[in-house]
């Protein structure tokens, strides 16, 4: 079996989390950039799972390596689960998360705590050269805070508030965040599956 796994992402923050969690697998985990791959993948699935599978399969077919890909996003119940599968493209792909986060806080202006429920969802897909596909899913429940707080996370972390910890996911230290996060849960589940495959 190949001793490398490509994780189909260009997001450095995400790669840091992924490498920490998969560190004890006896295999090199590389990003698209580290693998020297440039690909413009059209994510036209209707669900997180479909998009993750599209990404993993596309890169696996290009490289012949085992490829992992994730699709994740924020679902805000009050906003009909927006931004959902459009989380990365919400308000335009090049829009900063400060602007996106402020926009979402603004849209929830005056909405009481009990209606600010939200969750991060992450689906990870693994595509194998033999055509096999595996998927795992993780979620973390919380609420949308009233202000942007914390600098340990990325994306929507600074507005995702965890009442039981009295802080946002961007204020958690990396180890605790990896333990609790949607991506951490999905990755650990995937890691268990990969142990039998590599």
Image (tube, rainbow, N blue to C red):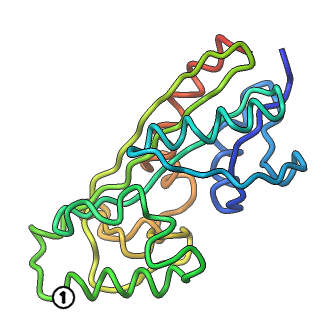
Q: Residue at x 85, y 21 (%)?
A: 2
Relative vertical location of residue 57 with respect to residue 113 in this rendering, above or below = above
Q: Residue at x 63, y 56 (%)?
A: 14
**Foreground pick, 7 / 55:** 55
Q: Residue at x 60, y 27 (%)?
A: 191
**Where is residue 109 shown, x and y percent of the image?**
18, 88
**Where is residue 53 shown, x and y percent of the image?**
55, 35
Relative vertical location of residue 124 with respect to residue 99 in this rendering, above or below = above
Q: Which residue is mark 1?
A: 109
Quadrant (top left, top right, bottom left, bottom right) of the C terminus:
top right
**Where is residue 87 shown, x and y percent of the image?**
44, 64
All told, the count of numbered labels is: 1
Relative vertical location of residue 21 with respect to residue 141 in this rendering, above or below = above
Left/right of residue 26 with respect to residue 45 in the rendered view? right
Q: Residue furthest right?
A: 36
**Where is residue 69 shown, x and y percent of the image?**
62, 41
Left/right of residue 62 with respect to residue 98 in the rendered view? right
Left/right of residue 150 with respect to residue 8 in the rendered view? left
**Foreground pick, 173 / 64:** 64
The secondary element bearing badge 1 is classed as loop
Crowdedness near tag 1: few (<14), some (14–19) or many (≥20) residues, C-alpha within 10 Å: few
Q: Residue at x 65, y 62 (%)?
A: 13
Left/right of residue 196 with respect to residue 179 in the rendered view? right
Quadrant (top left, top right, bottom left, bottom right) of the N terminus:
top right
Residue 66 figure quarter = top right
């Amino acid at each position: 079996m190949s001793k490398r796994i490509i994780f189909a992402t260009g997001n450095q923050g995400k790669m840091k989390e992924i490498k920490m969690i998969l560190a004890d697998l006896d295999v090199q985990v590389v990003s698209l950039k580290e693998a020297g791959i440039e690909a413009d993948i059209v994510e036209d699935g209707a669900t997180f799972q479909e998009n993750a599978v599209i990404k993993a399969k596309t890169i696996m077919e290009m490289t012949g390596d085992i490829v992992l890909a994730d699709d994740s996003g924020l679902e805000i119940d009050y906003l009909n689960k927006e931004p959902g599968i459009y989380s990365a493209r919400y308000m335009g792909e090049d829009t900063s998360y400060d602007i996106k986060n402020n926009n979402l806080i603004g849209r929830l202006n005056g909405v009481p705590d009990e209606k600010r429920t939200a969750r991060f969802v992450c689906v990870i897909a693994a595509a194998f050269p033999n055509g096999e596909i595996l998927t795992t899913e993780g979620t973390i429940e919380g609420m949308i805070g009233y202000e942007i707080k914390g600098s340990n996370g990325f994306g929507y972390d600074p507005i995702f508030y965890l009442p039981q910890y009295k802080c946002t996911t961007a204020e958690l230290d990396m180890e605790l965040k990896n333990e609790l996060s949607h991506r951490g849960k999905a990755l650990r589940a995937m890691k268990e599956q990969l142990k039998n495959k590599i």
